[in-house]
Amino acid sequence: MKHVNIHCDVAQANEIIEILEECLISAFQILDNVKVKNRIGDPRMNNPIWPGYNVLIMTQIREQAKFEQLMHKIKDYNIKVTHLDQLIMLEAWDIDTLIFE
């Protein structure tokens, strides 16, 4: 099982939600108004100097095939962006314990 964090500009959030739904990942959590200073692209600190902000979408994925499909779709998305600020960052790690049943 994987825990997945997806960071993106708020402008891309709906597209990422569509990708999750295409992968049949229906359970996720969204943290809104996340201030970021990325390694690539402009900071988004939601202030007059650095306008904008990110969202953090978190999910837990049991099936390896769904995780791989999601990674593939995010990589494809990033290949097609026209500006560095549109890149999506995905990070994932194994979950040892999950209690929600």
Image (tube, rainbow, N blue to C red):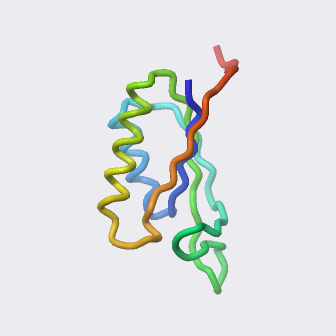
Question: Where's the C terminus, which quadrant?
Answer: top right
Horizontal and vertical percent position of residue 26: 45, 31
At horizontal 51% and vertical 54% (from top left) the residue drawn is 89
- Answer above or below: position of 39 versus 7: below
- Answer above or below: position of 35 versus 93: below
At horizontal 54% and vertical 37% (from top left) the residue drawn is 28
Tell me which corner region of the image, top left, top right, bottom left or bottom right, holds residue 24. Answer: top left
Horizontal and vertical percent position of residue 44: 60, 72
Residue at the bottom extreme? 49
Horizontal side of residue 31 vs 77, given as left or right: right
Horizontal and vertical percent position of residue 6: 53, 48
Horizontal side of residue 59 vs 26, given as left or right: right
- Answer above or below: position of 21 versus 50: above
Residue at the top extreme? 101
At horizontal 55% and vertical 54% (from top left) the residue drawn is 7
Question: Where's the N terminus, which quadrant?
Answer: top right
Tell me which corner region of the image, top left, top right, bottom left or bottom right, holds residue 54. Answer: bottom right
At horizontal 64% and vertical 66% (from top left) the residue drawn is 36
Q: Between residues 12 and 81, which one lies in front from this camera angle? A: 81
Q: Between residues 25 and 42, which one lies in front from this camera angle? A: 42
Number of marks in the image? 0
- Answer above or below: position of 2 versus 79: above
Horizontal side of residue 98 vs 53, given as left or right: right
Horizontal and vertical percent position of residue 59: 55, 36
